[in-house]
Amino acid sequence: MKKYLLVASLTACIFHIPLAKQTLAATFKEISPTKPDKVTLFGAGSLRGALSEVAKNFENVAGVTVETSFAFSGLQRERIENGQKADVFASADISNPLTLYQKGLSGPVINFTNNRLVAVTNSDSQLTTDNFLQQFLSNVDKIGTFPPLSDPLGAYTQDVYRKADAILPGSLQNLNEKSIFFTQELVPPDKFTSGGLIAWGLQEAPLELKVDAFISYYTSALAALEISPNLKVVELPENLAIKADYGLTVLKDAGPKGQELADYILSSDGQKVLVKYGFSPLGVTPKPVPEPSSVGGVFLAVGIAFALNKKQASAKKQLVNPFGEFKIQNSKFKIISLHG
């Protein structure tokens, strides 16, 4: 009889073990707060202000944590190619996200917003839209820009230079010889923001790095004006004007919240924030970017223009960096009136 009672007791214990485990799991679940889903957003440096705000709004709406990283679009693409985890990539051009799509690393590319190029100078400069090319060729000694192989703004600037060369042959070489290609090694860490770098390069940089004018995104020019009202923005003339199309893509291994973040950026709420920071509204539902037969020609053209300057750019990069490793600081910009 005792033998049967022992078997029955053991059977009851075994039966209750799963129930006990379920009860303990439920108890610990109640005690331990659930970690919110995380989404990683890689963005162009010029999108720092706008997409930081969009990301914060999305966190409030979706109940997730958005980790952001902002840098040159070309560098962001390389990081993704080298295996760094990202769910969404928002680039200042179409070529970089399109490269990821062509390699099978992301979904289709969407043109989600636009920007444009302008010049930023000190307020006492004689530069105007009407005399733009003449002043840049004759009276502007140093032009601030960015490396075209890693930053779309540098590539767009080369497009401006090529347009100038079509108007007046020799302008491409002239303008490249005057250009200083700013990289993180040349700039104090707390100045390496889109607006901060422009203001520093025009007003505070040491003599060898101080420039007379910057070719800039309109949005970055607004940020620079907020930092220093003693600057002015000059629109490029129509025959030199460049529009910058920004591309958005969701990475292949992104979670569902990654697609939701991309959708939110494309939504009216996301677009309103971009417009607030100076980006051009699309006006219609964003459309997928058609895939060209090859993007190699784009990089080849940029490479040829950049090669003209290789020696000069290399020499400038040899300048000693007294500032060490940089970390871009968070900042929020607002739209202000243009000066001049």
Image (cartoon, grey):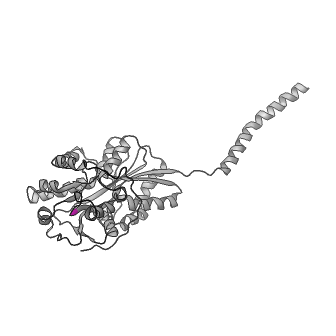
Q: Position of residue 198 (x, y in %)?
A: 29, 62
Asked if residue 204 lies in the magenta stretch, the reply is no
For residue 133, above or below residue 148:
below
Q: Is residue 104 above or below residue 55?
A: above
User: For the point 31% across and 48% down, which residue is it?
Assistant: 74
| Location of residue 10 (image quadrant) | top right
Specify whether 134 is left or right of 327: left
Q: Quadrant of the N terminus?
A: top right
Q: Where is the C terminus found, in terms of image quarters?
A: bottom left
The image quarter in which residue 70 lies: bottom left
Q: Which image quadrant for residue 174?
A: bottom left
Instruction: Name the residue nearer the viewer: 329 or 28.
Output: 329
Q: Is residue 289 visible?
A: no
Instruction: Give whichever of 218, 314 is nearer the camera.
Output: 314
- How many marks on residues? 0
* Residue 88 horizontal/vertical position (percent): 41, 50
Residue at the limit of the structure toward the right, as seen here: 1
| Residue 309 pos. (x, y %) | 17, 49
Residue 149 in view here: yes
Residue bounds of the magenta highlight: 209-213
Residue at x-position 40% and y-position 40%: 83
Q: Is residue 336 above or below residue 248?
A: below
Q: Is residue 7 left or right of residue 88?
A: right
Place of residue 110 in the rendered image (x, y in percent of width and height, measured from the top left): 34, 54
Residue at the extreme left:
169
Q: Main secondary structure of the magenta part?
A: loop
Above or below, comparing residue 9 to residue 145 in the picture: above
Left or right position of 163 against 290: left
